[in-house]
Image (spheres, coloured by chain):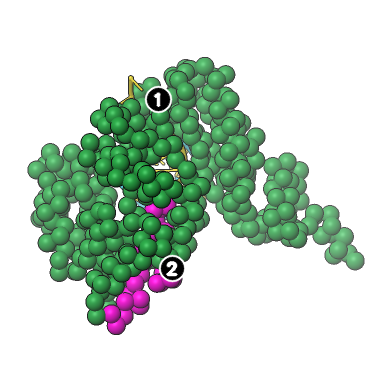
Chain colours: A green, B yellow, C cyan
Amino acid sequence: MARVIVHIDLNAFFVRCEEIKNPALENKPVAVGREGRAGIVSTCSYEARKFGVCSGMPTFKAKSLCPQLILMPGDYRFYSVMSKTFFKFIRRYTKFVEVASVDECFADFTEAIKGQKDVVGFFRQMQLDLYKETQLKCSIGVSITKFLAKMASDFKKPMGLTIIRKSEIKKYLFPLKIEAMYGIGKKTAPRLRSLGINTIGDLYDRIVKQEKQTIELLGKSEGVIRDWLEGRGSDEIELERDDPKSIGNSTTLPYDTDDYLVIDKYLVDLAQEVSFRAKKEDKLGYTVQIVVKDQGFKSHNKSHTLENPFNDWNTIYQQAKQLFQTNFNSLTVRLVGITLQNLIDLKEMAVQMSLFDYEKYEEESTTKLLINEINRSLKKPLLKRASEVDKNEHR
DNA sequence: TCTGGGGTCCTAGGACCC
DNA sequence: TCTGGGGTCCTAGGACCC
């Protein structure tokens, strides 16, 4: 039996939060984004969109399209509070909620709507209740897989409600422009267009016919897309999505430079920030990656993996520094970033360490620090010093 | 005045081991 | 003699999403 999978998307979330704080902003062209050389619009109101403003656009360009645009710097603490309030509200209906980002989630409503005669009325009421309680506006998509629910929630904004039954996939999705397909971005869409594929329906036809050029272009995702468009694909709600696979920070410099002394200061800051966040999450990593964007906006990555995991800022910094100096010494840099990868949980680490010949590692300073960290995080020491273990055993 | 900053996943080549 | 094939890890780069 098919499940009822719902995607709920908060409309113009950051801007809506600003309107909640200051209702005078309602019905005006508003955008959240920084001013300055690297400022871009992260969200904008529907009024601003009428002028051609959209997210991702440089703020100076948005201003030129819409001179009366009200630009807000962003109050991310408040957004976070509102975001949590939203998820709490949805969890009153079902415990199967998958947080997809600050302003959207998937949820399994199979049980929640059991016995409901008027499904449309049920979700409409939920949408109104959310608005009444939090003043947040949302669009709701209802279907049988996450992909279809996500596509459905995109149909009408703001305050949309769209239900796509399995028999209605063709009717709803096939006429849509290829750019509207989740997973097809700004690189793949033009390539598909050049093959004469303009709509999702066109794409499906080519896949069914196994047309060579299309299949080659899509690679492995061909099968995934076919499944999606035939009503298969994931309907699993992942409850725990809070386990990060990497922790990174990056920053666009105030001006492009090839002066390492300038860049070094940023590497120190970034290493400290990454270390701080990793420690907060009780994570260690084996690999440091640096990202550099050059004047032409092209990215370059270099990474290095060490034998033992770490999360202290100095190790991160030293690795980053070395990677930078050996690879990018004469490059003119626009942005630098540091990411800690190959993460391992401190507790997992403790278990692994206890299986090891612990004495062998005792001399290495990183490992010593690590053991202190583990003991600190577990409050009670889990690992005793090797010498103490010996003493206890002879007692 | 062209383009943030946080991520995830995939691909492909080379090293290395057996 | 001059070259197998499978598996895994590391690294670089690219596409995509919010």
Local SS, label 1: loop
Chain for disc number 2: A
Query: Which residue appears farthest toward the right when viewing the image?
Result: A395
Q: Chain of mark 1?
A: A
Tell me which segment is drawn in magenta: A92-116
Would residue A63 be found to the left or right of residue A373 on screen? Answer: left
For label 2, the SS is: helix
Question: Residue A394's quadrant in the figure?
Answer: bottom right
Q: Position of residue A374 (x, y in %)?
A: 69, 54
- Looking at the picture, tell me which residue is in the foreground, A88 or B15: A88
**The N terminus of chain A sits in image quarter:** bottom left
Which residue corresponds to mark 1?
A37
Which residue is located at x 57 percent, y 24 percent?
A264
Q: Quadrant of residue A145?
A: bottom left
Q: Is residue A146 above or below residue C3?
A: below
Where residue A36 appears, as percent x and y from the top left, is: 41, 26
Mark earlier in primary sequence (2, 1): 1
Mark identifier at residue A91: 2
Instruction: Name the residue rendered at 43%, 71% in the picture.
Output: A92
Residue at the image point whose x is 73% and y is 55% from the top: A375
- Asked if both marks, 2 and 1, belong to the same chain, the answer given is yes
- The C terminus of chain A: image quadrant: bottom right
Q: CA distance from mark 2 to mark 1?
A: 41 Å
Neighbourhood count class around disc 2 (C-alpha, 10 Å): few under 14, some 14–19, many 20 upward: few
Residue type at numbered disc 2 = Arg
In this picture, is A382 found above or below A78? below
Residue A112: percent from left, percent from top:
35, 76
The amino acid at mark 1 is Arg
Query: Which of the numbered marks, if any, corresponds to residue A256?
Result: none
